Image (cartoon, rainbow, N blue to C red):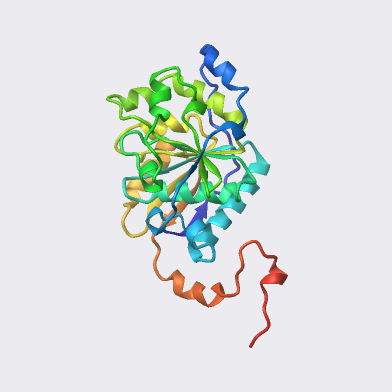
Amino acid sequence: MIQSLKLAHQPLETVNPAAPRSVVPATEQAGREIELDQVPVEEVDIDTLSRIVFHTDPRGLAADRFRFLRMRIRERSNAGKLQSILITSAQPQDGKSTVSLNLATALAERGQNPVLLLEGDLYHPTLAERLGVKDGPGLADCLASNLHPFSAIRRLAPLEWYLLPAGSKMPNPSELLHSDRLAQIMRALTPHFKWIVIDSPPVAPIADALALARYADASFLVVRAGVTPGQAVEAAVESLGPKHVMGVILNGVEGLRRLYSKYNKYYVPGATDKQRRKPEQ
């Protein structure tokens, strides 16, 4: 789980290029009238296997790190356009999907902010399975047809954020992600959400992450401590573009939990500093 975070210090710049000026289908124009409260709610069981520690262990160290990450994202958002955030990794199994789930939960703030988690890993999707979401259409189906994305979005309770799952298995996921149709979908979604978190495939060995990065305002690179080679990290940053990488999230750091535990009993999520202080016994 996330235990350390390093943020880039360069000013935030939006490197998202102008979206292709394709004609938006009439079905999407009509979809702009859709309200979020019309999206069906789906109850999901959140257990330890989902690894959404922000929900299952809100007093823990990992949840606290996601609060810190949320705070820094807000700060950077005030400095420039920051709505869509790509979460990727240098290689598989570094924990980028777990970070995506927790970041969406943190940004939603119990439903106060409309947040969409978009499952962009069409080769190896895991989010819907981890959440126990029922099978149905998703991003791949929207890319392959004129299906409006709101037809595939679910609102998840008790997490209080929205999910656009990967959807059906397709024989050509890379071609779908590199098509102009993705630009149409992002234009249809953007006006409705404060934050869009994109769970992307790893940067290597395929180029799908770079296709999704075109429609993100910034990206975070998840790195597993002691596992991810430094050369792989450097190559991933170079591929995404140093100005696009807002920060590097170091996952799986050992040794911090013991130092944090003695303060854990004094922490109450959402409390002020004055409320968190308790008299010594």
Look at 55% across and 53% down and name the residue there. 69
Look at 46% across and 53% down and name the residue there. 249
Tell me, yes or no, if residue 42 can be seen here.
yes
Q: Farthest residue in the bottom direction?
A: 281
Horizontal arrangement in the rendering, residue 122 relative to residue 83 (left or right) = left
* Residue 219 percent coordinates (x, y): 49, 41
Task: Report the number of discs.
Answer: 0
Look at 41% across and 71% down and name the residue there. 255
Report which quarter residue 174 is drawn in. Answer: top left
Q: Farthest residue in the right direction?
A: 274
Q: Which quadrant: the N terminus?
A: bottom left
* Residue 133 percent coordinates (x, y): 41, 42
Q: Which quadrant: the C terminus?
A: bottom right
Report which quarter residue 209 is drawn in. Answer: top left
Q: Farthest residue in the left direction?
A: 171
- From the viewer's side, name the closer residue of 103 and 220: 103
Above or below, 48 against 155 in this view is below
* Residue 227 percent coordinates (x, y): 31, 56
* Residue 44 percent coordinates (x, y): 45, 47
Tell me, yes or no, if residue 24 can be seen here.
no
Look at 38% across and 27% down and name the residue there. 140
Above or below, 185 against 80 in this view is above
